[in-house]
Amino acid sequence: MCSPDCRCYEGENGEIKELWVSYGNEALNPYLKNAGDKNMAYGNETAYPFKWTDDKLLAIRSFKQCYEEVLVPKRKYTGQFQQYVESFFDSGGYDFLINMEQEYDDCSSACGIQLFYLSKDISLGSPTKECVGVALDKANEVAQNIGLVLFLLGVIIIISIVFTFALCSGYEADRSGDIAQVNVEGQAVELSDKGNVDPERIDFKGLDENKTVINNTDNNVSDADKLQNSNAIVSIDKDKEPIKISGDSLGIKESKEKK
């Protein structure tokens, strides 16, 4: 590329040539190129100058153009690696690298950062990344996003399980203080330590199936006694399945003692 076989287009006013020369020998020499006009030694090898032309018809604008229009027709592969280079390019390796370069920005090749893009115009300058590394970085970003989504989904599932368990299991009476709370058909019923209840909100049915009501104004000891040390059935809606609770959890024992 940019050799006597594939002379590069220098630009309308030489701006493309200036861009590449501006990289300097320190950046160009490892690729066996130099920023001058003559050959120069680079270790035990030779760094060659770029070859330019202002003729748009004869100029080469990319390595892809050089490869397809010059190297392949003339079978110009390089030295001792000729067989390997030819095999790689003719067996799909070239197309693979072209696709990688078009998929990701600012990258070229798969084994290290190269001096030229394979398919992009030389006016874009030299690539700054190799494509395999860029592809791996993109894959890691996708994996991290998937991991975050799965984590959030797991949190949502755990929260759903907790609330579902609470809804399905119901609530026990609170016996920690003077006020007992019983959740009946989704309603919280407060019962004082005297056993006072609102008869329009809750019915007590003793084991003998006789209806017993303890109202807010009359602490009926005999009725409380019927429920003492026994089980009671609490129901607001007679059409629904009643809920069994123990009588002493309603403060009935406390009512008898205070009376």
Image: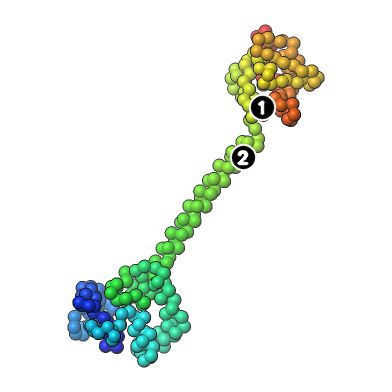
Label 1 packing within 10 angstroms: few (<14), some (14-19), many (20+): some
Q: Secondary structure at mark 1?
A: strand
Q: How many marks?
A: 2
User: Quarter holding the C terminus?
Assistant: top right
Is 94 displayed left or right of 229 in the figure?
A: left
- Nearest the viewer among 82 and 157 is 157
Q: Which residue is mark 2?
A: 164
> Could you say where residue 106 lies in the image, as x and y percent from the top left?
34, 69
Q: Which mark is residue 184?
A: 1
Residue at x-position 61% and y-position 36%: 166
Residue at x-position 67% and y-position 21%: 201
Mark 2 vs mark 1, CA separation in Å: 18 Å
- Residue 190: image quadrant is top right
Is 20 displayed left or right of 189 in the figure?
A: left
Is the residue 42 above or below the residue 226 in the image? below
> Could you say where residue 122 lies in the image, as x and y percent from the top left?
29, 76
